[in-house]
Image (cartoon, rainbow, N blue to C red):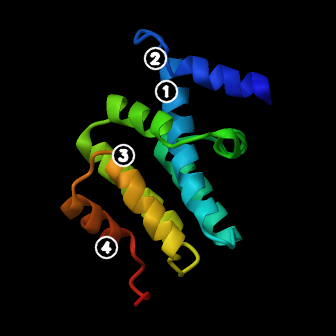
């Protein structure tokens, strides 16, 4: 497990010409942020886990096996992470504003998956949005797009 974490942290300083490794690092950083949203809720249920898996599979066009591996590694990494800055700074460096907004919308989908938005989830989303340098208007728009129609 520590080897995987060391491998992850070494990829944060990957040379730009190592595209496959950089893509895996980006995938892991995205997975960790979604998993953090899932973990922010006192009750981490199947709906949230299924939403994370569905989004990762769709977003990165992964096989079932690959998305399970990414999710497991993301959960291990999230448990051992001391802050979110290491992940958000990577996304800030590698993604456009529109791509980061889409990631925020996906994180909101995870938060809404159980049809209940906890205060902890709401606070974490605000914090991550600030770290991703997303404007208040884009934050609210992403939240509204992700909110299921049947929720108050």
> Which one is earlier in the sequence, the residue at label 4 or at label 3?
3
> In this picture, is 5 found above or below 78?
above
Give residue 123's quadrant in the image. bottom left
Name the residue: 62% across, 54% down. 53
- Camera-near label (2 vs 4) is 4
Label 1 to label 4, Cα distance in Å?
29 Å
Q: Which of marks 1 and 4 is nearer the N terminus?
A: 1
| 141 left or right, relative to 31 | left
Whole-angstrom CA distance, mark 3 to mark 1, is 21 Å
Image location of residue 2, percent across then percent down = 77, 26
**In the rendered image, which residue does mark 3 sit on?**
131
User: Percent x, y for residue 132?
Assistant: 34, 45
The residue that appears at 58% across and 54% down in the rendered structure is: 36
Q: Of the numbered discs in the image, which one, if any, rests on residue 4?
A: none
Give the mark nearer the N terminus: 3 vs 1.
1
Residue 23: which numbered mark, if any? 1
How crowded pointer 2 is (Cα within 10 Å; few <14, some 14-19, many 20+) is rated as: few
- Residue 33 coordinates in the image, percent (x, y): 52, 48
Which is in the foreground here, disc 3 or disc 2? 3
List the residue tagged with mark 2: 19
Residues at marks 2 and 1 touching, judged by CB atoms closer than 8 Å: yes
Crowding around mark 1 (Cα neighbors within 10 Å: few <14, some 14 to 19, many 20+) is some
Residue underneath mark 4: 144
Q: Do the residues labelled 3 and 2 touch (CB within 8 Å)?
A: no
Indicate whether 151 appears above or below 71: below
Residue lying at 64% horizontally and 44% vertically, measured from the top left: 78
Q: Residue at x 46, y 38 (%)?
A: 85
The answer for how far apart the CA atoms under marks 4 and 3 are is: 20 Å
């Amino acid at each position: 497990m520590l080897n995987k974490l060391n491998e992850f942290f070494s990829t944060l300083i990957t040379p730009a010409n190592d595209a496959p490794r950089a893509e895996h690092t980006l995938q892991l950083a995205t997975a960790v942020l979604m998993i953090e949203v899932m973990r922010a809720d006192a009750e981490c249920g199947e709906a949230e886990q299924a939403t994370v898996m569905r989004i990762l599979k769709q977003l990165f066009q992964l096989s079932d096996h690959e998305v399970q591996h990414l999710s497991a590694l993301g959960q291990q990494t999230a448990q051992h992470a001391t802050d979110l800055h290491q992940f958000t700074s990577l996304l800030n460096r590698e993604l456009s504003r529109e791509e980061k907004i889409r990631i925020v919308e996906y994180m909101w989908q995870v938060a809404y998956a159980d049809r209940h938005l906890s205060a902890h989830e709401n606070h974490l989303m605000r914090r991550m949005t600030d770290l991703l340098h997303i404007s208040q208007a884009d934050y609210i728009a992403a939240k509204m797009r992700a909110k299921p129609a049947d929720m108050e």
